[in-house]
């Protein structure tokens, strides 16, 4: 009789454990399903809208600047009406050139203020109808003669670019946009820097236009969806 009672007790314990494990499994499955649904909801809720005002244009373009410096950047460029204006003055070392709203996609730049003579000369020559090669040759001659100030060696250009012209008004991020960085070293070469003249792999720095006024280090970070 005692053995019979022990067998019944053990059976009860096994059934209880089985039910507990099944309940835990059901609970875990429920958590996973809930998390997956929440992830889908977050993806759907991202609200990208057209950049259709000067305020939106400035907000999105400021993403080109380092986050800690955005509040003090000078901001210039074409407004929604097609006029080249100063949106605001700044009090730090950066100038932000907003995306041109008349062009497809998105391309905003943030550069060290010592580069402004070089950048302004390029805008002036483009406004005169000069081609890319013509602008290069003119600025090369002017830089070599000392007429054109090329800024401080090592001055940087930050570029925020992408194919979309939609942005998230809550974060100011442009849909699918990425970063690229340029460090200007006028007349530097592969020999003077130790950098290759072609990238040896993704995310590797290299020197472009070596030996010229536009010599610069190119740095193209891997896109977020390609990081390893």
Image (cartoon, rainbow, N blue to C red):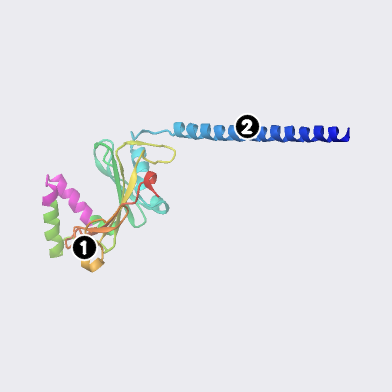
Question: Which image quarter is the N terminus in?
Answer: top right
Q: Position of residue 195 (x, y in %)?
A: 26, 63
Per the rendering, the mark at residue 26 is 2
Q: Position of residue 107 (x, y in %)?
A: 28, 43
Q: Is residue 54 above or below residue 97?
A: above
* Residue 86 part of the magenta-drawn span: no
Picture residue at 42% right of the left edge, 53% below the top: 68
Q: Is residue 194 above or below residue 2?
A: below
Q: Is residue 83 above or below residue 26?
A: below
Give left or right: position of 212 versus 183.
left
Q: Position of residue 190 (x, y in %)?
A: 22, 64
Q: CA distance from mark 2 to mark 1?
A: 65 Å
Query: Which residue is at the front of the view, 61 or 160?
Result: 160
Residue bearing mark 1 = 186
Viewer can see residue 206: yes
Tell me the SS state at disc 1.
loop
Q: Position of residue 41 (x, y in %)?
A: 49, 31
* Residue 127 part of the magenta-drawn span: yes
Tell me which segment is drawn in magenta: 117-134
> What secondary structure predominates along the stretch shown in magenta?
helix
Q: Quadrant of residue 225?
A: top left
Tell me the SS state at disc 2.
helix
Viewer can see residue 188: no
Q: Residue furthest bottom?
A: 192
Picture residue at 30% right of the left edge, 45% below the top: 108
Query: Which residue is at the front of the view, 84 or 169?
Result: 169
Q: For the residue carrying disc 1, how many other residues have a C-alpha within 10 Å: few (<14), some (14-19), or many (20+)?
A: many
Q: Residue furthest right?
A: 1
Per the rendering, the mark at residue 9 is none
């Amino acid at each position: 009789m005692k053995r019979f009672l022990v067998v019944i007790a053990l059976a009860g314990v096994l059934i209880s454990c089985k039910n507990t494990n099944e309940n835990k499994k059901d609970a875990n499955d429920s958590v996973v399903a809930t998390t997956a649904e929440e992830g889908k909801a977050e993806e759907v809720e991202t609200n990208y809208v057209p950049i259709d005002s000067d305020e939106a244009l400035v907000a999105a373009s400021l993403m080109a600047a380092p986050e800690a410096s955005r509040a003090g950047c000078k901001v210039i460029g074409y407004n929604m009406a097609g006029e080249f204006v100063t949106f605001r003055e700044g009090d730090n070392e950066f100038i932000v050139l907003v995306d041109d709203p008349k062009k497809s996609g998105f391309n905003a730049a943030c550069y060290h203020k010592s580069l402004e003579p070089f950048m302004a000369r390029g805008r002036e020559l483009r406004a005169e109808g000069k081609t890319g090669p013509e602008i290069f040759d003119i600025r090369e001659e002017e830089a070599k003669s000392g007429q054109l100030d090329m800024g401080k060696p090592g001055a940087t250009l930050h570029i925020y670019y992408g194919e979309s012209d939609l942005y998230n008004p809550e974060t100011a991020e442009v849909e699918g946009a990425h970063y690229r960085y340029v460090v200007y070293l006028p007349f530097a070469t592969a020999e003077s820097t130790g950098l290759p003249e072609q990238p040896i792999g993704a995310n590797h720095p290299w020197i472009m236009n070596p030996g010229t006024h536009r010599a610069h280090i190119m740095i193209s970070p891997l896109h977020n969806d390609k990081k390893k």
